[in-house]
Image (tube, rainbow, N blue to C red):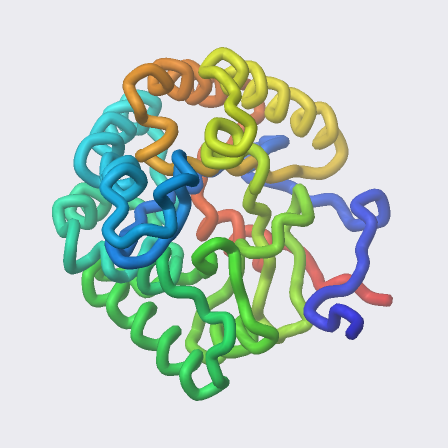
Amino acid sequence: MDNQLFDYSPIIERAPIRWPNGARIAFYVGLNVEHYRIDRPSTSIFPDTKALAPDPLNYGWRDYGPRVGIWRLIESLDRHRMRASVMLNSDVAERYPQIIRAGRERDWVWAAHGKNNSVLQAGMSPEEERSYLAEVIGTIEKATGRKPRGWLGPALTETFRTPELLAELGLDYVLDWANDDQPYRLNVPGMLSVPYSIEVNDVQLFVGKSLSGPDFLQLVKDQLDQLYADAEDSGRVMSLVLHPFVINQPFRHRYLDQALEYIANHPGVWLTTSDEIAGHYAATTAPETV
């Protein structure tokens, strides 16, 4: 079937985007704060045991994130005066309340990221999915004091109904379609797509491609510099997607901190959140006409 969720729109034919204060780049940290079930396989560093339940090797590797890694990351974000855009599993609210408390103290924004990273929506009926989404959104709103405006599916998964159901539940944007350097409107009234990177993403870079810390630092710099050059006439978005069980391993963390320092001191960069990007775009641009 043809894609009906969004239209083809080459970036060279769009009206210019203007970010606040003349910035060329809207930058946000996409911080994945997740819970994984111990009885299901998931993202793994060692494939030989990933089908086991329990799988201490891979579960323990993932569990480093909420226990240790995120607290190291928070120190860096505070140092560089960056707020996180949190892709939040709703199960985190019950299991790791200290993380929710730290985020509330720092005015983080919260995008709903499913119940946990072991359950996907694929195969749900419309009624099941509506109930699932409402439960996830309600749990996050109760825990954080703020209703999510955005959605990132676990493993970036959706059904053909997900954006429409999210709009019915009052959300404004999705992050699942990593196909652009700018936000754009979906063919669902009131719903946007906001850029999210599956390549400038620590899981892909370190687990998928086995890059080193210095490789990561150079890659982030190259990404920002190219987008900055591209944005001479129209603003771009840069997301830096992080998972604390990966990027905040001790031997990698220093390179993340150096990357954040480079971004924070780069001219023409608006340090912002995914919520603010979606809100500014919706308020300052008009729908494209065909």
- Front-lying residue, 125 or 279: 125
Q: Residue placed at 80% from the left, 50% from the top?
A: 14
Specify the quadrant that holds the C terminus: bottom right
Number of marks present in the image shown: 0
Tell me the quarter of the picture where residue 233 sits: top right
Residue 22 horizontal/vertical position (percent): 61, 32
Residue 157 sits above or below residue 266 on the image: below
Q: Does residue 106 appear in the picture of this structure?
A: no
On screen, 209 above or below 40? Answer: above
State whether residue 260 appears in this view: yes
Judge left or right: residue 252 versus residue 207.
Answer: left
| Quarter assignment of residue 6 | bottom right
On the rendered image, what quadrant is the N terminus found in? bottom right
**x, y (%) of residue 17?**
68, 44
Q: Quadrant of residue 46?
A: top left
x then y, percent, for residue 44: 40, 41
> In the rendered view, would you say 220 is above or below 159?
above
- Residue depicted at 65% across the width and 41% down the height: 18
User: In the depicted view, which residue is nearer to us: 129 or 5?
Assistant: 129
Q: Residue furthest bottom?
A: 127
Q: Is residue 247 left or right of residue 172?
A: left
User: Of all residues shown, which one is farthest toward the top?
Assistant: 214
Image-based side of 224 in relation to 65, left or right: right
Residue at image coords 63%, 74%: 188
Q: Position of residue 242 (x, y in %)?
A: 41, 36
Horizontal relation, residue 272 to residue 134: left or right: right
Q: Residue at x 42, y 62 (%)?
A: 149
